[in-house]
Image (cartoon, rainbow, N blue to C red):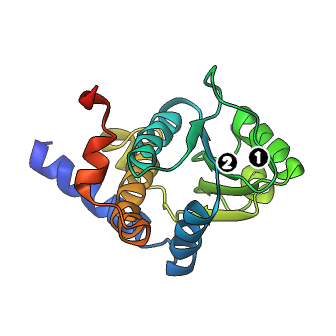
Amino acid sequence: MTLRETTGYLKERCKDALFSISKEDRDKLIDLIISKEKIFIYGSGRSGLIGQLFSVRLVQMGLTVYFVGDMTTPIIEKNDLTILISNTGRTVSVVQTAEIARRIGSHVVSLTSSASSRLAQASDTAIVLSIEKNSTDSELAPLGTIFEDTVLFFFDCLVPDLMKKLNVSEEDMRKRHAIWV
């Protein structure tokens, strides 16, 4: 496979998964992000890395965001927002975080590809990406590549709307960028 062919494959697979997310789910997540005082994000492994990338964007917009598991992360409280990411929805640490956060009273939003998973069931809002298994995936997009790339793309697609609703410019974000130290 050439780079062009692999890129085309990933683009089409991720586009299909991205377009499976409803406008209602997208708008609800935006409203929750804007309305909550603190936002907690968590995922394990590569899903966690995607969550950390989104955390940085939200911090650059001036929001109070924590990544669950970091040493300086405070305890999730009632009325906070907890965003959890797991392709299978079975990752034990992610499911446990959902159960604890929801019991405390945090609104739990999960991003997963399994509507019937424990994570989706433990969430107040489950954003389910429709990702059909394709025989070519193991060669061009192994493991959770389509899910992870789609979640990253989805989060990046939220940024312009969040910027507008929060009245944040790119210059405002640049002032909160780590390299300005």
Callout 1 environment at 10 Å: few (<14), some (14 to 19), or many (20+)? Answer: many
Secondary structure beneath dot 2 equals loop
Number of the label disc, if any, that sits on residue 149: none
- For the N terminus, the quadrant is top left
Above/below status of 22 relative to 1 = below
The residue under the point 38% across, 45% down is: 60
Residue 125 in the figure: left or right of residue 23: right
Above/below status of 37 relative to 69 = below
- For the C terminus, the quadrant is top left
Q: Quadrant of residue 111?
A: bottom right
Place of residue 88 in the rendered image (x, y in percent of width and height, measured from the top left): 63, 47
Q: Which residue is mark 2?
A: 89
Q: Amino acid at mark 1?
A: Ala
Q: Nearer the viewer, mark 2 or mark 1?
A: 1
Q: Which residue is mark 1?
A: 98
Residue 133 in the figure: left or right of residue 95: left
Q: Which is more toward the observer, 76 or 47?
A: 76
Q: Earlier in the sequence, mark 2 or mark 1?
A: 2
Q: Amino acid at mark 2?
A: Gly
The residue under the point 53% across, 35% down is: 48
